Image (cartoon, helix red, strand yellow):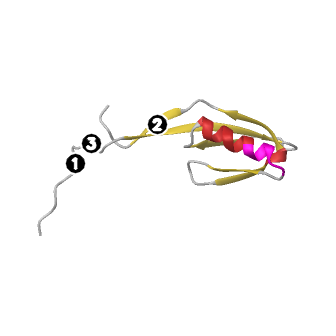
Amino acid sequence: MRAGPSNLGRAAPATEREHVEIKIGVQSATRELVLEVTKSADEIFEEVQKAVVDDGGVLDLVDDRGRRVLVPGDKIAFVEIGEPEVRRVGFGAI
């Protein structure tokens, strides 16, 4: 039985993913929601704006761990959108 080529000693290609931290204040809640998503700040802004402007709108976000968060637009007190942060994924050479 012959083994295939070894990947030992080789660096796997690194990929970059942009993460944005979002803080959402909800009316009548003592704590804010904090999420990290892989969307751009502009995409998040558009989704928040739609949820707040539409009567009965819902802010629907999925964080980078796959958790889905739904917030009624009329219950949003504030939204803080952080600066994009690029994280390297993989074992690339430094």
- Amino acid type of the residue tagged 2 in the rendering: Arg
Identify residue for label 3.
Answer: 11
Find residue 77 and report its horizontal and vertical position in percent: 82, 38
- Amino acid type of the residue tagged 3 in the rendering: Ala
Q: Are marks 2 and 3 in contact (CB under 8 Å)?
A: no
Q: Quadrant of residue 34?
A: top right
Say what secondary structure mark 1 lies in: loop
Apparent side of residue 67 relative to residue 50 in the rendered image (left or right)? left
- Amino acid type of the residue tagged 1 in the rendering: Leu
Q: Residue furthest left?
A: 2
Residue closest to the eye, 12 or 77? 77
- In the image, the segment drawn in magenta is 50-55
Select label 1 or label 2 by which is in front. Answer: 2
Binning the other alpha carbons within 10 Å of mark 2 as few (below 14), some (14 to 19) or many (20 upward) gives few
From this view, report whether residue 39 is shown above or below residue 84.
below
Q: Are marks 1 and 2 in contact (CB under 8 Å)?
A: no
Q: Earlier in the sequence, mark 2 or mark 3?
A: 3
Identify residue for label 2.
Answer: 87
Magenta highlight: main SS? helix
Disc 1 from disc 3: Cα separation = 8 Å
Residue at left offset 18%, top offset 53%? 6
Select label 1 or label 3 by which is in front. Answer: 3
On whether residue 38 falls in the magenta region, the answer is no
Say what secondary structure mark 3 lies in: loop
Find residue 20 and report its horizontal and vertical position in percent: 58, 37
From this view, report whether residue 69 is shown above or below residue 81.
below
Disc 2 from disc 3: Cα separation = 17 Å
Residue closest to the eye, 18 or 40? 40
Identify residue for label 1.
Answer: 8
